[in-house]
Amino acid sequence: MTFTRAEYDRVCAERDAVQVTCERLETHIDEQRAAIEDVAHKLNNMLAAVLGSVDMVLRELPAGSSSRTRVERIQSAALTSADLVTQLQRGQFAP
């Protein structure tokens, strides 16, 4: 198969355009990944504060009290959120 110079130049130009697009997409992906990591880090810090506070409160509340049950629900939600943050940091997203 023989190509004309014009065909060869066109194919090369298309290849170059695809390469530039791929590079832009890789840059965009890297930027998104960095943003996700930053948000995950900040969420982790906030969750650590919540879980630490919950721990202190639970030490003071008697077993079986309605307040303790509510605080345990907060603890459960914070732990679930911490698991989601871990998934974000690892790039693993569970449905």
Image (tube, rainbow, N blue to C red):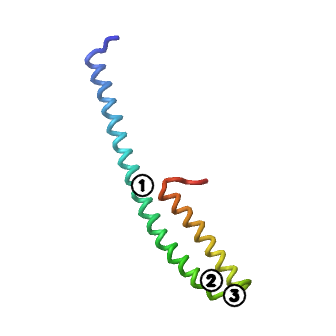
Q: Quadrant of residue 58?
A: bottom right
Number of marks drawn: 3
Q: Residues within 10 Å of mark 2 (few under 14, many from 20)?
A: some
Q: Residue furthest top?
A: 1
Q: Secondary structure at mark 2?
A: helix
For badge 3, the amino acid type reads: Pro
Q: Name the residue beneath numbered marker 3.
A: 62
Q: Name the residue beneath numbered marker 2.
A: 58
Residue at horizontal 37%, vertical 40%?
Answer: 22
Q: Nearer the viewer, residue 82 or 24?
A: 82
25 sits to left or right of 76: left
Residue at horizontal 36%, vertical 39%?
Answer: 21
In the rendered image of this protein, does residue 57 appear above or below residue 92? below
Mark 1 → mark 2, Cα distance in angstroms? 36 Å
Q: Secondary structure at mark 1?
A: helix
Q: Residues within 10 Å of mark 1 (few under 14, many from 20)?
A: some
Mark 3 → mark 2, Cα distance in angstroms? 8 Å
Circles 1 and 2 in contact, beta carbons < 8 Å: no
In the rendered image of this protein, does residue 37 appear above or below residue 7? below
Expressed as whole percent of the image width and height from the top left, the position of residue 68 reads 68, 83
Residue at horizontal 72%, vertical 85%?
Answer: 65
